[in-house]
Image (tube, rainbow, N blue to C red):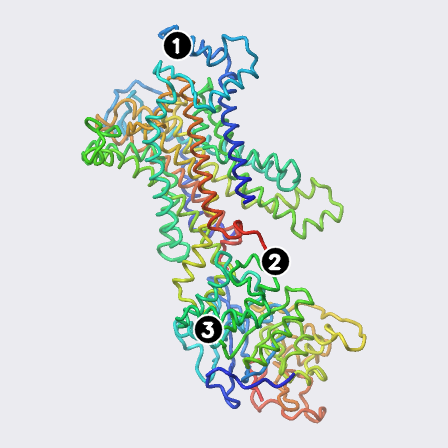
Amino acid sequence: MRYLLKRLLLLLVAAWAALTLNFILPRLMPGNPVEAMLARYQGRLSPQAVNALEVQFGLNTHESAISQYFTYFGHTVTGNLGTSISEFPTKVSSIIGSSLPWTIGLVGFSVIVSFVIGTALGALAGWRRGSRFDSVAVPFGVMLSAMPVFWISLLALYFLAFKLGWFPLAGGIGGTGSVGISGAGSIISHAALPAITLTLVSVGGWVLLMRNSTVSVLGEDYIKFGRAKGLPERAVAFNYAVRNAILPQFTSFALALGFVVAGAIFTEYVFSYPGIAYNLYEAVLSLDYPLMQGIFLVIVVAVLLANFLADLLYVFLDPRIRLEARA
Amino acid sequence: MAAAAPATSTGPATASTPLLEIFGLTVGYGWEGRPMSTVVRGVDLSVGAGEVVGIAGESGCGKTTLALAATGLLDPPGQVLSGSVRFCGRDLLALSQRELRTVHLSEISMVFQASMNVLNPVMRIRDQFLDAMKAHGVEDRDGAVARAKEMFDLVKVPRRFFEAFPHQLSGGMRQRTVIALALVLRPQLLVLDEPTTALDVVVQRSILEMLDELRNELGFGVVFITHDLSLLVEIADRITIMYAGLAVEQAPARQLYEGPRHPYSQALMRAFPPLGGERRRLEGIAGQPPDLRQLPPGCSFQPRCPRAIAGTCEVVAPPLVRFEAEHWAVCHLYDRVDDHPNVTDQGLGEDHGEKGATVG
Amino acid sequence: MRAFFSNRLAMAGLAILVFFGLVALLAPVIAPYSPTDINFTPFLPISSQHWLGTTSQGNDVFSQLVYGARASLMVGLATAAIISVVQLAMGIFSGYVGGWVDNVLNTITNIFLVVPALVLLIILAAYLPGKGLGVIIAILAATGWAWGARVLRAQAISLRDRPFVEAARMAGESRWRIVLVHIVPNMFGVLVANFFGAALYAVLAEAGLEFLGLGNINDVTWGVMLYWGENTNAMLLGQWLFLLLPGLCILLLGTAFGLLNFAVDQVANPRLRRN
């Protein structure tokens, strides 16, 4: 329990740090962000937009930075993430609301599938350390994790979608975008390539981590004793080796998730997939600060939440954390 | 020690057939591209039903490897190079992995060194009993639980820890639990490797007493491995002293205590005076055990031996010399029968020496 | 050390790294043209004049690839070096010194661990005015140090309690001497493994940033090559070679660092050694 509380506290602090970073960064940049944006948009911003911007960045008011901070804090926590510039006057939160589900589906699928497949293969490689499978799995894992996700996405797009026409070229859903049976099929075919490439790039890391974890667990005394009890190999493999080797993977979850989200930025970009990561890219390109900040915050919070879920799972699975020593 | 009650298990060991017989066992460790280290060299040992046989020696003398190899638990890069092991008359080393698995725990149990970490941290203790029992054909779950809890009582661990996880028990309790696990299927032979070394003295004592009671109750034979000779002197029936992979002396406990013959045994005795004995100056043994990959010719103990005979010990392998019943040593000091009235037999006319020794 | 050189993975990684190193060093000799020379007709196919054709802007692909090695290697190694120094300092302070310093540093590390690094990277890249490789190295280092720092801290803590360190302390050795002579040498294996891991991260992240156009699009790097490829419809014109090759180079260099990272870990980490 203490462990969970500590983790929760950490995640809250991290969220706060992200929020504060959002506040500080544009004000740290040289010059006036509004002027910078005006320059960028070359005067194509409407007066209302400029006004909203100035309010957002607290440039027009005579409030102190501290009170601006509290206003910002208050707004953010209540869900007011401001108004987008590039899509003025759409609110940031509604842009995010419509694109977030796509990304959650994509990232969620990739993380889970890559974890399951990667861990299974890694466990097999570790269990049969030194075997042919292991000596192939390791370099493969290294190569997969060194693969630039945008590159493989480009290649996939080119060969499988463009040349062979097996998959659609862009978008999240085709045609009318209706949701229904035909809609579902279209969603899947549009999501297939992004999901596959994202999963592929993430699998390698899990394979290597789990393999090493398994190898290191196999050196433990309880494995030897499990065998000495006369247990069949299968029981030793699952209940003794895998159940212990898989625990440390949950602590790597944070990092892994971060990388998958980042990978999603590239995948969504290449496949023009209408997710939040794609929005982020466009926001960055057009220097739409409010949108950028909003998306950054949402991504961070989502990752932190997912982290917390992973922590919960970890606590559930490791009795040493779950139960304090009694004797 | 009190004579053990006859074995209650259904094994075929009788008073005449020894439980465990090890003949000339030689074990080596070999890594790729490196010369083989012979860690156990031609050791003979036997254990009778209900008997306690102790094996004593410094760390690295091969006693653990001997136990692992003899019970079929030796992992690569270790391998048995020659010799045989018979358990109740059956050739143990010829058994397949599958057959070995049925033997382990139900007929021979081994309790490793540092058993603190020998239990799976993510499984409840109850489940670690049950999976072992299930693997040996105990299908009735309730019956299995009852038997396991009985063992728990016998080792005096409170029943409420039965459902707990290993980290919730103290070191001493974990050791007892492991012993309970080792005995739950009523094996005929229990091999213990330094079972009490990592525990404090008081706990040590209580565990040894517990073992003694269990032995009286269940009648299993014991192989007790330790570096603490003073301990063995109290609990063992017979003791074998090992040095650099060889068995250098063997005798009933009392005889070894009263009259160790091999200089190494004598040195060991001097290093561990029993608690109740007279006050004596403690002496360590100078020097280091030899590098097993580059053994000197002649006696392995010679470089450290205070009684080495120049010109003989470093060149010629010492012979096996028998003293009174069941007491022998491998040493040059007793080469000439006339000098030592107690010597009954000097070798068997063959060069046994470092290659092997037969139990009287 | 001997174990390292007999490790196949390490040798493979080293071979690839040396290969790219040589290419980078000998770029002026190997490349037929200057990589920034745009006098050629764009989108030429493979020919004896242009071994790998020309880019959408009219540069020689082969020359760009060769010179691109310089950028990637430099970014990879420089970032890894900076990160390693930071990690070492943090690991030692946090692990060895302990106390409230450890708490603070550890919390900072954990925050950086849970916030997705690459997302932060992209945001930072967006805010920063200058976009040269130097800037990229700086923000890569600022976002990629956390994971290795945690590992090093764990190592420092375990070393702090080892008998030989205690003995040195009791013998009155100064804190700095203990750190330099006893602790750091024992962290060497982890440090080197981390170095290569950081280099891998740097190479991939740098390429990613440039691909998105967040770097300097006039630099000669593999990532920028892919940027131009994507943005000038090289795909539609069937110029897949132009898409394939820079990415392949990134993959190979990344693999080299990855192999070295894995191999060093295998050699140095006692729990992974064979018996």
Badge 2 density bin: few <14, some 14–19, many ≥20, Cα 10 Å: few
Position in image of residue A225 (x %, y %): 49, 65
Q: Secondary structure at mark 3?
A: loop
Circle 1: residue type: Ala
Q: Which quadrant does the C terminus of chain A fall into?
A: bottom right
Position in image of residue A85 (x %, y %): 38, 14
Chain containing the residue with disc 2: A
If you read the primary sequence from the N terminus, does the residue marked by circle 2 or circle 1 appear first? 1
Circle 3: residue type: His
Q: In the depicted view, which residue is nearer to us: B281 or A98? A: A98
Residue B168: in sight, yes or no?
yes
Disc 3 designates what residue?
B104
Circle 2: residue type: Ala
Disc 1 designates what residue?
A49
* Left or right: B234 as drawn, with respect to C52: right
Disc 2 designates what residue?
A327
Q: In the depicted view, which residue is nearer to us: A63 or B228? A: A63
Badge 1 density bin: few <14, some 14–19, many ≥20, Cα 10 Å: some
Residue C235 has which mark? none
Q: Secondary structure at mark 1?
A: helix
Position in image of residue B17 (x %, y %): 50, 88
Is the residue C32 above or below the residue A111 in the image? above
Q: Given this view, does label 1 or label 3 mark the residue nearer the observer?
A: 1
